[in-house]
Amino acid sequence: MKIVKKNQFCAVVDESYPLKLLISGREHGAKNCQVGIAVLKPGQRLPVSGYSRHASEEVSYILTGKVRLDTDTGSEIAEEGDLVFMPGNKPHASTNISQGEAKILWFVTPHTVPEN
């Protein structure tokens, strides 16, 4: 069992790489999933250019802020309290369009983020 305390969600994330793994294979023994948080500054886009694309299905919950989600077929807006499902292999990017930080809690299965 692993409990991630709420104060860990607010820990500083490296601005050059706004993703932080909360549940991982290496640290927690997760074999088929990863959980992380993305903290985006106003106007920040992830990835900076192009799209993320991975075989894993992804579920994201918008903790704070307002985010424009771009895919190869269009854009939609998600805001605090919204839940987003992204199918596997769907190119996607997220841009914080709010005045403050946007915090996105995300879940993928299987692993997609490299663990250094």
Image (cartoon, grey):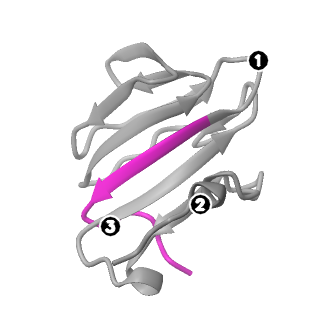
In the picture, which quadrant includes the C terminus?
Answer: bottom right
* Mark 2: amino acid: Lys
- Residue sitting at x 35%, y 52%: 107
Which residue position is annotated with label 2? 20
Between label 1 and label 3, give the one nearer the viewer.
1
N-terminal of the pair, mark 3 or mark 2, is 2
Q: Which residues are magenta?
A: 103-116
In whole angstroms, how far apart are the C-alphas of marks 1 and 2?
22 Å
Quick check: is 104 in the magenta stretch?
yes
Q: Quadrant of the N terminus?
A: bottom left
Residue under label 1: 99
Vertical arrangement, residue 71 with respect to residue 32, above or below: above
Q: CA distance from mark 3 to mark 2?
A: 14 Å
Drawn side of residue 12 relative to residue 64, left or right: right
Q: Secondary structure at mark 1?
A: loop
Q: Is residue 110 above or below residue 92?
A: below
Q: Amino acid at mark 3?
A: His
x, y percent for residue 38: 58, 47
